[in-house]
Image (cartoon, rainbow, N blue to C red):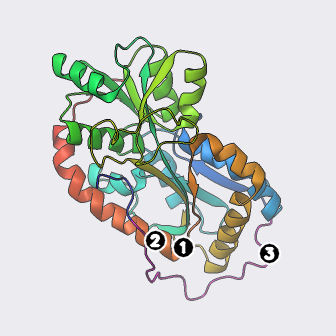
């Protein structure tokens, strides 16, 4: 099955033998680094629970957008931060794919991080500019066949969830699409809405404003079930690309060496925050499945993702077609 996520199972995880007590944590503001531009999926997810996390931990929670470098800029900042629980990373599939796509990373995944927990997964929409003469997957594939390499698709950069969905779609359909990378899902979707690019895979939170304005349309969704927020839109699987599934995941990590009691306190605060009805309402737009895992489960999940995407992306990366953003 073509899917961005693999089932997580329990695994042992090494933690510092002399973990500092968390009794006084936190006693100052906490920073969550989002390694994407403002307006993208990670930004939306982090801001959806930041207020409640702040209330739970009784300290300000600051969102720090550090887009660029296929998430490397923001991710490096967290990897090299003090392991004290005051600098966190909200991570996406790019964390698992960059070791394959960018072998000279300034940090080592997963060894330079202490997993806190997987937070949420959700399917994406395949959006098109409103003037594109297609309304479903068969029409899109026909257009791509007639105009090979000319139908463009925006992504959030190599290794992002939007890029991975595009890789899976091209692999499953053999459609010759031109990838146009941007610094985040927000800018990518703006390019579609303005007519600069034809298509984009991304979360419904980024697509919906442009659907409402009439500048974009929803061609399909990427899960195996229809989204509650778009029940009339068929999945890619339903439209003939059998077993296609591209699901985004987001999780929280800290720098390696962060004491386990602090990791546990953050994990517990995440569970409390994401169970709040107000947070659930904010997340309704993406039709996501909130699933705060244990640190051990997230560690094992991340290692499986790295191995899996290493096998898939080595051949596809050499065949990828890119255009300037």
Labels in figure, total:
3
Q: Which residues are magenta?
A: 7-27
From mark 3 to mark 1, how far is it between C-alphas?
21 Å
**Residues under numbered marks 3 and 1 in contact, where contact means CB atoms less than 8 Å apart:** no
- Label 1, on which residue? 295
Tag 2 or tag 3, which sits nearer the N-term? 3
* View extreme (bottom): residue: 17
Residue at 35%, 67% in the rendered image: 304
Q: Is residue 118 above or below residue 250?
A: below
**Residues under numbered marks 3 and 2 in contact, where contact means CB atoms less than 8 Å apart:** no
User: Where does residue 295 sit, x and y in percent of width and height?
Assistant: 54, 73
- Label 3, on which residue? 24
Residue 194 is inside the magenta segment:
no
Q: Secondary structure at mark 1?
A: helix
Which quadrant is home to the C terminus? top left
**Residues under numbered marks 1 and 2 in contact, where contact means CB atoms less than 8 Å apart:** yes
Q: Quadrant of residue 264?
A: bottom right
From mark 3 to mark 2, how far is it between C-alphas?
26 Å
- Label 2, on which residue? 299
Category of crowding for the residue at label 1, using alpha-carbon neighbours closer than 10 angstroms: few (below 14), some (14–19), many (at least 20): many
Instruction: Name the side, left or right, on which 121 lies relative to 1.
Output: right
User: Where does residue 68 sit, x and y in percent of width and height?
Assistant: 46, 38
Instruction: Name the side, left or right, on which 244 lies relative to 285.
Output: left
């Amino acid at each position: 099955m073509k899917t961005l996520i693999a089932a997580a199972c329990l695994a042992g995880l090494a933690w510092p033998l002399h973990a500092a007590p968390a009794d006084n944590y936190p006693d100052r503001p906490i920073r969550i680094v989002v390694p994407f531009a403002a307006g993208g999926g990670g930004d939306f997810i982090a801001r959806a629970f930041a207020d409640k996390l702040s209330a739970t931990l009784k300290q300000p929670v600051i969102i720090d957008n550090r887009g660029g470098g296929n998430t490397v800029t923001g991710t490096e900042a967290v990897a090299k931060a003090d392991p004290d629980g005051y600098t966190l990373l909200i991570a996406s599939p790019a964390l698992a794919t960059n070791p394959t796509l960018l072998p000279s990373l300034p940090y080592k995944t997963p060894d330079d991080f202490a997993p806190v927990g997987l937070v949420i997964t959700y399917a994406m929409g395949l959006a098109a500019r409103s003037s594109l003469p297609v309304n479903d997957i068969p029409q899109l594939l026909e257009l791509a066949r007639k105009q090979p390499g000319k139908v463009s698709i925006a992504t959030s950069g190599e290794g992002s969830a939007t890029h991975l969905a595009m890789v899976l779609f091209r692999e499953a359909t053999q459609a010759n699409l031109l990838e146009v990378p941007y610094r985040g899902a927000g800018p990518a979707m703006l390019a579609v809405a303005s007519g600069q690019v034809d298509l984009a895979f991304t979360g419904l939170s980024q697509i919906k404003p442009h659907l409402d304005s009439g500048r974009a349309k929803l061609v399909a969704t990427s899960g195996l079930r229809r989204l509650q927020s778009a029940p009339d839109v068929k999945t890619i699987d339903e439209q003939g690309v059998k077993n296609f599934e591209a699901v985004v995941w987001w999780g929280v990590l800290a720098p390696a060496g962060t004491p386990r009691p602090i990791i546990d306190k953050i994990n517990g605060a995440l569970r409390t925050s994401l169970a709040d009805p107000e947070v659930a309402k904010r997340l309704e737009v993406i039709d996501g499945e909130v699933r705060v895992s244990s640190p051990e489960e997230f560690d094992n999940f991340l290692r499986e993702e790295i191995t899996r995407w290493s096998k898939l992306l080595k051949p596809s990366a050499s065949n990828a077609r890119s255009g300037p953003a």
